[in-house]
Image: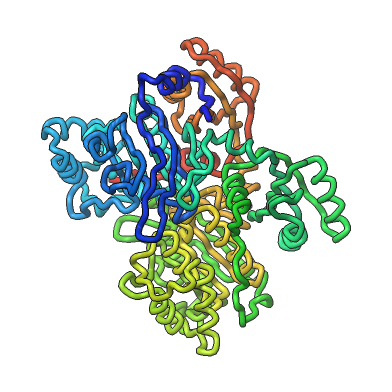
Amino acid sequence: MIAATPDRVVQRDAAQSSSVPPAIEARNLTKHYGPLEAVRGIDFEVRPREIFGLIGPDGAGKTTTFQILAGVMEATSGVANIFGRPAREMRSQTGYLTQSFSLYPDLTVAENIRYSGDLRRIDPQAILDRGQQYLRMFDMDRFSGRLAGKLSGGMRQKLSLICALVPQPHILLLDEPTTGVDPVSRREFWDVLAHLSSEGLTILVATPYLDEAERCHRIGFMHQGQILRIGTADELCDSLDAKRIELRTPDLRKTERILSAQSGPGKDIMDVQRFGDRLDLLVRDPEKEQKRVTEELSRAGLSIDEMHVDQPTLENTFVAQLRALGQSADTAEFPARHDHSDLRGQIAIGATNLVKEFGEFTAVKDVSLQIRNGEVYGLLGANGAGKTTTIRILCGLLDPTSGTIELAGAQQDLRSEAVRKRIGYMSQKFSLYDDLSIRQNLDFFAGVYGVPDAEREEKIRWVLSFSGLEGKQDQITGSLPGGWKQRVAFGAAIMHEPDILFLDEPTSGVDPLARRAFWTMINRLADGGAAILVTTHYLEEAEQCNRLGMMVAGHLVAEGTPSGIKGQQSGHLIQFIVDQPQRAVDLLKRNGESWRVSLFGKRLHLISEAAPDVAIRQTTQQLEASGLHVISAREDRFSLEDVFISIVEKARLEGKVAIEK
């Protein structure tokens, strides 16, 4: 399939010409590890200057494919070429950023860059010049003397990319480069990738975040070692031949149960997904299904607040494709033995005027919030916003400088055994022991949390089932991929059936189908009366929360339901399709506030305070005056990421965002 990006017509024709080879070519590529077929005869091409995304569930074979194309692993059979030559011979032309790329924490930013350049035998002056160029591009030049171990997650990933770019490769392979990176840094990261692509770099990227995949020119969907489909994001979504209905109703739990019983592959309702204040229905005939759903819910005595028809998302497409292949996000029923339903509506977690100071630095500034049993509350913020510090205070791990806390009905002695038994905590960094087996970890945490002996075995069996690791309980935990580790850690945190659960980025690095399973379980726990506080950097996932709080530099600056927060957003989101997207983005950023403009593949998003027709007319005139042609323009709905970026940037203008020093 051919990407429909207008400014790539010349590149497309060149790539199709027999005289110009593709930048990356895989033909009948296979890789076997003994009896395991990790890659099973895949075929795809990446065109020069293209950003090509590779998506798929954990274990699909993406990382193995990257290792072959990077020349660090030999294929069992088939062709893996870089600019027409074997990948192993072209390693000097290829930059490779692995999932576990390791910077040296005790070296400075500049020393890490110099070391990476020396490894590739780059001239020292060229290393210095290029390093400074990329540091300026990433707005990191003032941090050249900082130790890498002192950088935030987003800055570490930027430095990792700089280290890969210093040798000036012609091909860049990025294996899940933004896992654990906050939304602001992710958007900056992708803006740089778009620039590098427009300047001649060919990029192959794997990502579990499907909003990121929409920024690629084309996408390949990989499953069980095979590439099943290739196309633009729009082509993949259109291939579903379905629409998405957003349904808002006062009783989501009951509505979900009724409609889920009537959904599935091959049925009129293909899929039902629950969010914090709505359900998404994937349907073949939206007009017919709106009428039928209205009648069905009316018979059940359920009202409808709103129904809105929209295009399916790439995540809808991904999950539907996997379900058609027989995979499911359904999870086995958790063996609950303790009822928390009587706690629903009570204040489980509360904070009033919370302040936390570390010397002269104030990490949390006058934060007040309440989270009730039966509620999922999402705490959002960029790296350094104060989320993790706030969570540690709220769960009693850290004492506040001032303010009051209420936890499980207690305001004093939050570390008592009675309070501890009611809390589950999954930390931001994987908290199990890598040198123990999965079974040993689960036995240990069952003992720590006081899971009764009579319940322990069935709880451990459930965790293994939820994690997809039945029969692998003796495997060393450190050998597991990140997504599987997260599942085990989540299971370990809930074995004792806490009625208060703290989840700090629980789905970081988890594929979309597994993420759906996480949220199915989180909603079940909340339906059973648990209070759940979640942090996440994936803002499409944040829509699963009942309420959200957004933190900026220690302040809680916005709070409400996902729809409510989006509804409070001023301005309008305008989507343009132009013949030269990158030039258009550069122009608009130069002439206005850069955060208002972003590129999603071929689509340019602009946030404007003017009325939509005025914004479209003025922006079109501006672009046309610079020799750019606007193909189409229309108002679109804000995503939660658009709102988050807007809130952060407006807070920055008010002086609420701390500048890293």
User: Between residues 601 and 329, which one lies in front from this camera angle?
Assistant: 329
- For this view, does 601 lie left or right of residue 333? left
Instruction: Using the image, determine if residue 409 lies above or below residue 275.
Output: below
Q: Position of residue 593 (x, y in %)?
A: 45, 28
- Image mark count: 0
Q: In the picture, residue 18 is in which quadrant?
A: top left
Residue 656 picture quarter: top left
Residue 634 position, x and y percent, is: 63, 26
Q: In the figure, residue 532 lies in which quadrant? A: bottom right
Residue that lies at the very extreme toward the left in this rendered image = 124
Q: Is residue 487 above or below residue 124?
A: below
The chosen color scheme is rainbow
Q: Nearer the viewer, residue 271 or 364?
A: 271
Is 8 placed left or right of 540 in the picture? Answer: left
Q: Is residue 551 visible?
A: no
The x, y position of residue 518, in whole percent, is: 55, 62
Identify the residue at image location x=76%, y=48%.
Answer: 268
Q: Is residue 633 visible?
A: yes
Give the quarter of the figure containing the C terminus: top left
Q: Is residue 420 above or below residue 356?
A: below
Q: Nearer the viewer, residue 624 or 395?
A: 624
Q: Residue 267: image x %, image y %?
A: 74, 51
Q: Residue at image x 28%, y 38%?
A: 87
Q: Residue at x 60, y 59 (%)?
A: 328
